[in-house]
Image (spheres, rainbow, N blue to C red):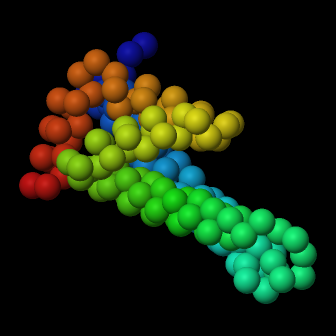
Amino acid sequence: MPLTGYAIEQKSRLRRHLHLLGIFWIAYGVFDLLGGAILWMVANTLFGRYGRLESDMPFFLHPLLSAIAVFIFLRAIAGIVAGWGLTQRFEWARGLTIVLGFLALIHPIFGTMLGIYTIWALLSPGADDEYQAMARGAAA
């Protein structure tokens, strides 16, 4: 027997996945921060100026690992900002998250899964117009 008198709100596919996607990007960014911090410590202890004096390590390892750590830090901060922007439904967050989703595809396992989920959710047919409407509604 169907219920009468109750209105059931049908959420769109994008609306159902948007908050979860934002949380995933924040968590992914936090894990990237941890990885970048570990790489930064390794670069400055084992391959830093003093670590190199004790062994015959190539001189280019310290700057190379430091540059990779900075790139990971920037990517992590961008992921956290994108996730926060998605949860708040800012207009710029969708574009940033799509770019980060494509970049995450080359990061095996979790990055690939998050990239596929991001592209599937944010590039579906009609998702652009729907997200813009949600962003305008959140700004009002």
Q: Nearer the viewer, residue 12 or 124?
A: 124
Residue 34 versus residue 132 in the image, above or below:
below
Residue 96 visible in the current orientation: yes
Q: Quadrant of the C terminus?
A: bottom left
Q: Percent x, y for residue 72? A: 55, 59
Q: Percent x, y for residue 133? A: 15, 38
| Label tally | 0
Q: Residue at x 14, y 55 (%)?
A: 139
Q: Percent x, y for residue 4? A: 30, 22
Please state if 114 lies on the left or on the right of 54 as rendered. Answer: left
Q: Residue at x 62, y 69 (%)?
A: 63
Q: Residue at x 49, y 50 (%)?
A: 25
Q: Percent x, y for residue 5? A: 26, 28
Residue 34 visible in the current orientation: no
Q: Quadrant of residue 61?
A: bottom right
Please state if 105 lies on the left or on the right of 136 as rendered. Answer: right
Q: Nearer the viewer, residue 124 or 106?
A: 106
Q: Return the residue found at the far right.
A: 55
Q: Residue at x 90, y 75 (%)?
A: 55
Q: Quadrant of the N terminus?
A: top left
Q: Return the residue found at the far top.
A: 1
Q: Return the residue found at the far left.
A: 140
